[in-house]
Amino acid sequence: MNFILIVLPVFIILAVGFIGQRVLDLDIKSISTAALYLMLPFLAFQTFYENELNMNYLYIVLFCILLLFALIMVSFLAGKMTSQQQSKTSAFVLAGAFMNSGNYGVPVILFAFGETGFQYAVIMMVIQSLLMNTVGLYFAAKGSKSGGTLKDSVVKILKMPVVYGSIAGLSLQIASVPVPTFIYNAIDLIGSATIPTIMLVLGMQLANISKKNVEMKELSAVLVIRLVLSPVIAYAITALLSLDSLLSSVLIVLAAMPTAANTTMFAVQFDTEPDLVSFSTLVTTSISIITVPLMIMFFS
């Protein structure tokens, strides 16, 4: 019951966005742009500024990089097997390689593993945020239907303010530079509104999905990558790194989380198969109500 109460708010926000879009027919691109350019940089700054660096970062950084590399390889293979389009392959990477370790994963870990597990989850959230806002943005830009070279993709990333928000937060945290209270209060307000806005965008995008644009073989491939292969690969990596049991359990459960909501925003912004990415987020989140408790039961 407690787990359902943790997940239920996510679905309520999705429902608000879904119903709002059906009734009001809003401009999703404008709202997505506002969240990506005006709000997400403040959340990134806050995340990196508040979480102090320690030795656990090293192990979790290695874990995240190895997991991401493996999932990108699997996603590329799945993309080539189901479609020859670059946009579809990039969509597989967005939906398959990036998990919702933040607004979904962190509270679940707190409930399942307590305060120590929660601290591990926060560290992974920070690292995943950095990877998603660099590597994830690269694949979103690369898969844009407007096309573009490697240079074009890199230029698009460098234009994203979220990258500089992350760098600024990490730099000030390392340098122990205090942020004035009146400024930080504003940052906190904007940052706190970012995740709900992203979830609203996801709900709105789901209201516009056309079933003909989402093939079952593609959706099935994403489901297998995100909910099956990801935790299996995570288990192998934790064994390879010889991590302690609690840290291993936390990382494996987080690896089994559904597709990150931010990937929908990236897909909408760059027109990288937004229907496939959005629907993958919805379906993996729905199924995770069953799969995540099973993972917790097995590893706790």
Image (cartoon, rainbow, N blue to C red):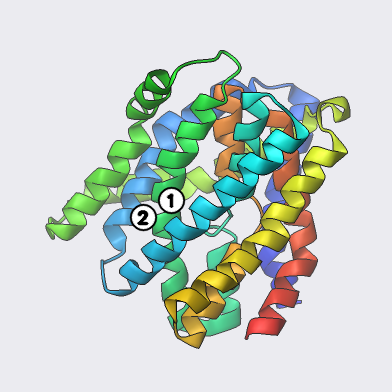
For the residue pair 226 and 89, the one nearer the viewer reads as 89
Pointers 1 and 2 in contact (C-beta within 8 Å): yes
Residue 110 in view, yes or no? no
Apparent side of residue 166 relative to residue 101 in the rendered image (left or right): left
- Percent coordinates x, y for residue 43 in the rendering: 39, 47
Residue wearing tag 2: 47
For the residue pair 120 and 34, the one nearer the viewer reads as 120
Which residue is at a point 49% across and 43% down the rendered structure image?
Answer: 194
Establish if 210 lies above or below 255: above
Residue type at tag 2: Thr
Which residue is at a point 60% across and 33% down the rendered structure image?
Answer: 90
Establish if 110 lies above or below 106: below
The N terminus: image quadrant = bottom right
Establish if 245 lies above or below 188: below
Residue wearing tag 1: 129
- Percent coordinates x, y for residue 161 in the rendering: 34, 32
- Percent coordinates x, y for residue 80 in the rendering: 69, 34
Q: Tell me the quarter of the picture where residue 216 sits.
A: top right
Which residue is at a point 81% across and 26% down the rendered structure image?
Answer: 213
Apparent side of residue 114 relative to residue 86 in the rendered image (left or right): left
Q: Residues within 10 Å of mark 1 (few under 14, many from 20)?
A: many
Residue type at tag 1: Ser
- Residue 228's disc is none
Query: Could you say whether the residue bearing mark 2 is in a helix, strand or loop?
Result: helix
Apparent side of residue 76 relative to residue 204 in the rendered image (left or right): left
Look at discs 1 and 2 and give the one toward the viewer. Answer: 1
